[in-house]
């Protein structure tokens, strides 16, 4: 009899503690099709709603940089002599009147 008790205890210890309902295969909502009984059921509660993306804010008024860019587009020096005559030389990249034809070595400083 003591041997039987030890065998039964060993078997009980080796058995899994909880029952397994199924092997998985749940979709994103935590649901799956029941192959044995047919149908569709879920194991988790309903998923939280996806966060809504906000539309990008629209610019209602032009920023200062836009005004500066418009001014830079209006100023044009055909050559460095014209830039020097206007008192703008040297003209740096980003300044009104800067253009690649004034900056032959492409270092960002025209009419140097």
Image (spheres, helix red, strand yellow):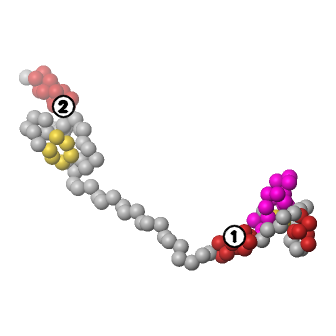
**Tag 2 residue:** 15
Marks 2 and 1, how far apart at CA: 76 Å
The percent position of residue 112, horizontal first and vertical second, equals: 91, 61
- Spot the residue most to the front: 78
Upstream in sequence: badge 2 or badge 1: 2
Q: Residue at x 30, y 60 (%)?
A: 49
Which type of secondary structure does the marked residue at label 1 adopt?
helix
The percent position of residue 100, horizontal first and vertical second, equals: 79, 57
Tell me which secondary structure the magenta stretch mostly adopts.
Answer: loop
Residue 91 belongs to magenta span = no
The percent position of residue 4, horizontal first and vertical second, equals: 10, 23
The circle on residue 2 is: none
Q: Residue at x 65, y 72 (%)?
A: 66
**Tag 1 residue:** 69
**Residue 77 in view in this figure:** yes
What span is in magenta?
A: 94-110
Which type of secondary structure does the marked residue at label 2 adopt?
loop
Position of the N terminus, as image quadrant, is: top left
Q: Residue at x 79, y 68 (%)?
A: 76
Query: In which quarter of the view is residue 99 placed?
Result: bottom right
């Amino acid at each position: 009899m003591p041997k039987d008790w030890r065998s039964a205890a060993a078997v009980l210890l080796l058995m899994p503690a909880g029952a397994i309902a199924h092997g998985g295969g749940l979709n994103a909502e935590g649901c799956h099709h029941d192959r044995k009984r047919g149908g569709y059921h879920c194991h988790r509660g309903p998923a939280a709603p996806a966060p809504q993306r906000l539309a990008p804010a629209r610019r209602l008024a032009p920023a200062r940089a836009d005004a500066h860019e418009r001014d830079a587009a209006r100023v044009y020096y055909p050559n460095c002599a014209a830039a020097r005559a206007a008192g703008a030389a040297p003209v740096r990249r980003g300044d009104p009147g800067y253009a690649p034809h004034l900056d032959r070595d492409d270092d960002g400083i025209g009419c140097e």
